[in-house]
Image (cartoon, rainbow, N blue to C red):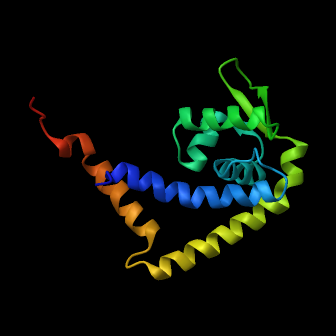
Amino acid sequence: MIGLGTFMRHVHELMDGAIAEVYAEHGLPEYRPRFSPVVRTLVAHGPMSIGDLARAIGVTHSAASQTVVQMRRSEFVILEKGSDARHRIVRLTARAEAALPLIEAEWAATERAVRELDAELPVPLAQVLTAAAEALERRPFRARMGHIEL
């Protein structure tokens, strides 16, 4: 029997892997689908701190920081010193800006594919995931597990 976490990761990998294939087919094999929310946010709002970026895309500071480090290694962003030593400002590079037409085209194609997938499901995937996240925010999973006896 496949565990729920394994099953969720598998579904994510099926979707994420297909998106990564698009970038590889267009000469950007190091571009990861997780970069797109960062790129789109920086295009819309300009350079910003990692903390502000995390809030804007709805992830933890740690997750945003890890993504930015990967993007920096692949030369899609640069980091600049902020107004104080604790803040680093994330800015797109010319390489990322050159990839914007592909990133936007992939985003639109992904949205179409999600709508098509949703039409085949009894309930739209985002609706189920939103409901699950809201339920877990009301009562965390650990609380639902209760006491574990050995």
Q: Nearer the viewer, residue 81 or 33?
A: 33
Q: Hey, which residue is sitting farthest bottom in the picture?
A: 119
* Picture layout, residue 109 above or below residue 90: below
Q: Quadrant of the C terminus?
A: top left
* Picture layout, residue 24 above or below residue 54: below
Residue found 65% across the figure and 20% down from its top? 86
Residue 76 lies left or right of residue 116; in this view the side is right
Q: Nearer the viewer, residue 81 or 59?
A: 59
* Picture layout, residue 14 above or below residue 38: below
Q: Quadrant of residue 135?
A: bottom left
Residue found 88% across the figure and 45% down from its top? 95
Q: Quadrant of the N terminus?
A: bottom left
Question: Picture coordinates of residue 87 (x, y %)?
Answer: 67, 25
Residue 46 lies left or right of residue 133; in this view the side is right
Q: Quadrant of residue 130?
A: bottom left
Q: Nearer the viewer, residue 117 or 40?
A: 117
Q: Quadrant of residue 121?
A: bottom left
Residue 107 lies left or right of residue 9; in this view the side is right
Q: Hey, which residue is sitting farthest front in the picture?
A: 1
**Number of numbered tags placed on the structure image:** 0
Question: Picture coordinates of residue 131 (x, y %)?
Answer: 35, 62
Residue found 77% across the figure and 54% down from its top? 24
Residue 125 lies left or right of residue 16; in this view the side is left
Q: Hey, which residue is sitting farthest left in the picture?
A: 149
Question: Picture coordinates of residue 127 (x, y %)?
Answer: 41, 68
Question: Picture coordinates of residue 69 (x, y %)?
Answer: 69, 31
* Picture layout, residue 18 above or below residue 52: below
Residue found 77% across the figure and 48% down from its top? 29
